[in-house]
C-alpha cells in the first residue's frame, strides 16, 4: 500500500534521486562504450546489407550477360541461315524479305552486345566494390567483437551494484503515485538527470539560486512539494536528507 503523506513523498523522491544519480555515475563509468557498440553494430548491419545488395547485382549481371551472349549466338546462327536461304530464293521479294530479317537480327545483336558490355561493366564494378566492403565488414566485425568484450567486462565489474540499484529503484517507484513519477522523470530529463535537490546554505542545490527565507521555512515543514523558482527542480529540506542518510 502506498504511503501518502507529503513527507513520505519527499523522502521517497529524494531517495529515488540518490539511486538514479548513482546509476548515472555507473553508466558514465562505461564511458562511450555502449554508444560505440551501438554505432559499430549499425555499421556492421549496413555493410552486411551492402554485401547482400552487391552479391545480388553480381548474380543478376552474370545472368543478364550470359543471356545476352546466348541470344547473340542464336541471332548469328539465324543470320547465317537467312544468308544461306538467300542463295536459293526464286524471287526478289523473298530475297528482300530475308535481307530485312538479316538486318533486324544484326541490329538486335548489336544492341545485345552493348547490353552485354554494360552487364560486364556492372559486374566488374560490383566485384571491386564487394572486395572493399568485405574488408570493411571484416574490420568492423573485429572491432565490434573487441568493443563488446570490453563492454561485457565493464558491465560485469558493476553488475552487482547496478542490479542492487535497480532493485532499490523499483521498490521506491511502487511507493509513489504515477503523477509524481511522471513529474520527477520530466524534470530529471530536462535537468541532466537531477530532479530533486536539497536547499543548501539558503540556495537551490541544483542551480544555486537563492531561496527566499520564508520559502525555506515552508520547505522545512515538509507539508508541500516546492519547486525552485529558477530551475524547476523539487526542493527538499535537511530533514528529508537526514532521513535518506539513515535509510542507507
Image (cartoon, rainbow, N blue to C red):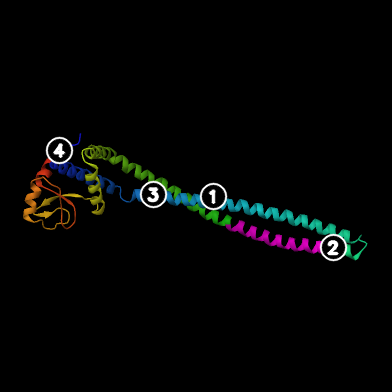
Q: Nearer the viewer, residue 173 or 76?
A: 173
Residue 205: say if magenta: no
Percent from the top left, x then y, of residue 141? 45, 48
Label located before the other in sequence (2 or 4)? 2
Residues packed near mark 2 inside 10 Å, few (<14), some (14 to 19) or many (20 plus): few
| Start-end of magenta stretch | 99-125
Q: Which mark is residue 134?
A: none
- Residue 107, by quadrant, is bottom right
Residue linked to disc 1: 52
Does 56 sit left or right of 185 as displayed?
right
Quadrant position of the N terminus in the picture: top left
Q: Which mark is residue 97?
A: 2
Q: How far, Cα to Cα, is label 2 from label 4? A: 104 Å
Residue linked to disc 4: 247
Q: Point out the frontmost of discs 3 and 2.
A: 2
Q: Nearer the viewer, residue 132 or 23?
A: 23
Q: Mark 3–mark 2 contact, CB under 8 Å?
A: no
Q: How far, Cα to Cα, is label 3 from label 2? A: 68 Å
Q: Residue furthest right?
A: 90
Q: How far, Cα to Cα, is label 4 from label 1? A: 57 Å
Label located before the other in sequence (3 or 1)? 3
Residues packed near mark 4 inside 10 Å, few (<14), some (14 to 19) or many (20 plus): few
Q: Residue at x 70, y 56 (%)?
A: 68
Label located before the other in sequence (3 or 4)? 3
Q: Nearer the viewer, residue 47 or 14?
A: 14
Q: Point out the frontmost of discs 2 and 1.
A: 2
Amino acid at each position: 500500500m502506498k504511503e501518502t503523506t507529503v513527507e513520505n513523498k519527499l523522502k521517497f523522491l529524494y531517495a529515488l534521486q540518490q539511486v538514479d544519480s548513482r546509476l548515472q555515475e555507473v553508466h558514465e563509468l562505461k564511458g562511450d562504450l555502449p554508444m560505440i557498440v551501438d554505432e559499430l553494430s549499425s555499421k556492421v548491419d549496413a555493410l552486411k546489407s551492402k554485401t547482400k545488395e552487391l552479391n545480388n547485382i553480381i548474380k543478376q549481371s552474370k545472368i543478364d550477360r550470359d543471356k545476352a551472349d546466348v541470344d547473340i549466338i542464336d541471332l548469328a546462327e539465324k543470320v547465317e541461315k537467312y544468308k544461306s536461304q538467300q542463295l536459293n530464293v526464286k524471287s526478289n521479294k523473298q530475297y528482300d524479305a530475308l535481307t530485312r530479317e538479316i538486318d533486324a537480327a544484326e541490329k538486335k545483336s548489336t544492341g545485345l552486345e552493348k547490353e552485354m558490355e554494360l552487364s560486364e561493366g556492372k559486374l566488374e564494378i560490383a566485384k571491386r566494390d564487394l572486395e572493399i566492403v568485405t574488408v570493411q565488414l571484416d574490420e568492423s566485425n573485429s572491432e565490434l567483437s573487441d568493443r563488446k568484450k570490453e563492454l561485457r567486462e565493464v558491465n560485469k565489474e558493476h553488475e552487482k551494484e547496478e542490479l542492487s540499484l535497480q532493485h532499490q529503484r523499483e521498490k521506491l517507484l511502487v511507493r509513489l503515485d504515477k503523477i509524481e513519477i511522471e513529474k520527477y522523470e520530466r524534470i530529471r530529463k530536462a535537468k541532466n538527470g537531477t530532479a530533486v535537490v536539497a536547499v543548501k546554505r539558503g540556495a537551490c542545490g541544483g542551480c544555486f539560486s537563492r531561496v527566499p527565507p520564508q520559502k525555506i521555512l515552508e520547505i522545512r515543514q515538509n507539508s508541500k512539494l516546492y519547486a525552485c523558482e529558477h530551475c524547476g527542480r523539487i526542493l527538499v529540506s535537511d530533514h528529508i536528507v537526514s532521513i535518506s542518510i539513515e535509510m542507507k
